[in-house]
Amino acid sequence: MKKPRLYSGMQPSADSLQIGNYIGALLQWRQLQTSYDAFFSVVDLHALTQPNNPEELREKTRRTAAQYIAAGIEPSQSTLYVQSHVRAHAELAWVLSTITGYGEAGRMTQFKDKSARYGTDSTSVGLFTYPVLMAADILLYQSDVVPVGDDQKQHVELTRDLAERFNKRFGEAFTVPIPVIQKDTARIYDLQNPTSKMSKSAESDAGVLWMLDDPAKSAKKIMRAVTDNEGVVRFDRENKPGVSNLLTIYAALTGRQIATIEDEYAGRGYGDFKKGLAEVVVAEFEPVRGRALELLDDPAELDRILAANAARADAVADATLADVYEKVGLLRRV
Ligand code: ATP
Ligand code: LTN
């Protein structure tokens, strides 16, 4: 039986991924890749919507791909590739943009937030059409499911609308995808500011646990994480966001229940608890970091893996694009 298709991706917006990307995305991806025909991309075209140093963007793209593999995405099993290597993304995005309403795109909250923050003159058209490119990513591969964070749900809803609209107007070309929203328990917060989401592009890195950081540095950040004065290791997101966040990380990495961890640390202080967590994090990240650095030591080999996977992606994407071009009435080049 054919496996259902799965599509997801991350922007190469930092040298290292952070533990939220690992727990909230990569751990799920790793698990899902066995039951789905999975496509995972490093969405470098999307990353162009932010200012970048060209050499650094290239490096971040390689590093992000290496971390996917190091975290257990198998490039022989899943199709792990760089978005810009597959020309069809930009081409389908153009066609989809012609059936996207101006107002419809303007209602995307991510765009509204960013344009409100920076002003329309500092907000590019690329940022405006970002969700259309994302729709192209997903639809090119006839994806059935798209695991994403809550913030991307609206973009997948737009993708569904565009797929249905196109199918109705021009004939069946696309599978209508279903968003799979990450569980709340997979959401990780900043260690210094435990009510905001941990993020690769956080302003300060004091509260961010990087996958590629020196383990001693990560341990130190955990020891310095913001907690509270109660001194009891207890999950209470509302009143104890710091401790609750540390418990979430602990539980996600060990597969243990939060209640079991609370019991283990009953009557012991935060120092002990943090030390325990630091050991867990370091033990989890050490092999991942080692493997990622090893891959990055041989960029030519990594580039070969990415090229082979891009060829696989090309085959699927080109078939969809050819069908779309035919359906909308573009003259075929003979
Ligand atoms: P940026 O700051 O560049 O937006 P980010 O670290 O917030 O980056 P994204 O690239 O937006 O991460 O997201 C990649 C994947 O990681 C998504 O599936 C997203 O839901 C997940 N993710 C990101 N941050 C967290 C977090 N703090 N907790 C859980 N999942 C997260
Ligand atoms: N916008 C997403 C990244 C992304 C994506 C996709 C996710 C681009 N294309 C296709 C799933 C499917 C983000 O910022 N996390």
Image (cartoon, grey):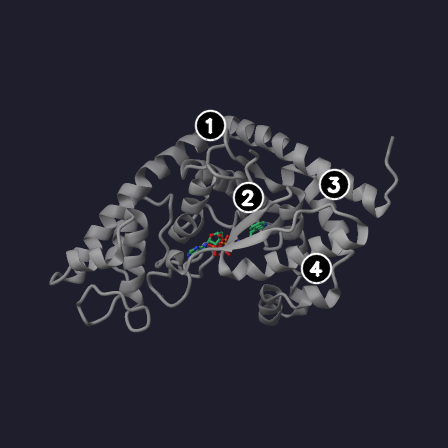
Residue receiving disc 2 = 6
CB under 8 Å between discs 3 and 2: no
Q: CA distance from mark 1 to mark 2?
A: 29 Å
Residue named by callout 3: 321
Query: Callout 2 environment at 10 Å: few (<14), some (14 to 19), or many (20+)?
Result: many
Q: Nearer the viewer, mark 3 or mark 4?
A: 3
Amino acid type at image mark 1:
Asp
In this picture, is 147 found above or below 119? above
Amino acid type at mark 4 = Val
Question: Reading the chain from its start, which is encountered first: label 1 or label 3?
Answer: 1
- Categorize mark 3 by other alpha carbons within 10 Å: few (<14), some (14-19), many (20+): many
Is disc 4 surrounded by few (<14), some (14 to 19) or many (20+) residues within 10 Å? few
In contact (CB < 8 Å): disc 1 and disc 2: no
- Counting residues from the start of the chain, the first of labels 3 and 4 encountered is 4
Q: Is residue 253 above or below residue 306?
A: below
Instruction: Name the residue at 24% across, 70% down.
Output: 228
Residue toward you, 83 or 28:
28
Residue drawn 26% across and 65% down? 235
**What's under tag 2, amino acid-wise?**
Leu
Image x and y of residue 183, in percent: 42, 57
Q: Position of residue 102 (x, y in %)?
A: 74, 65
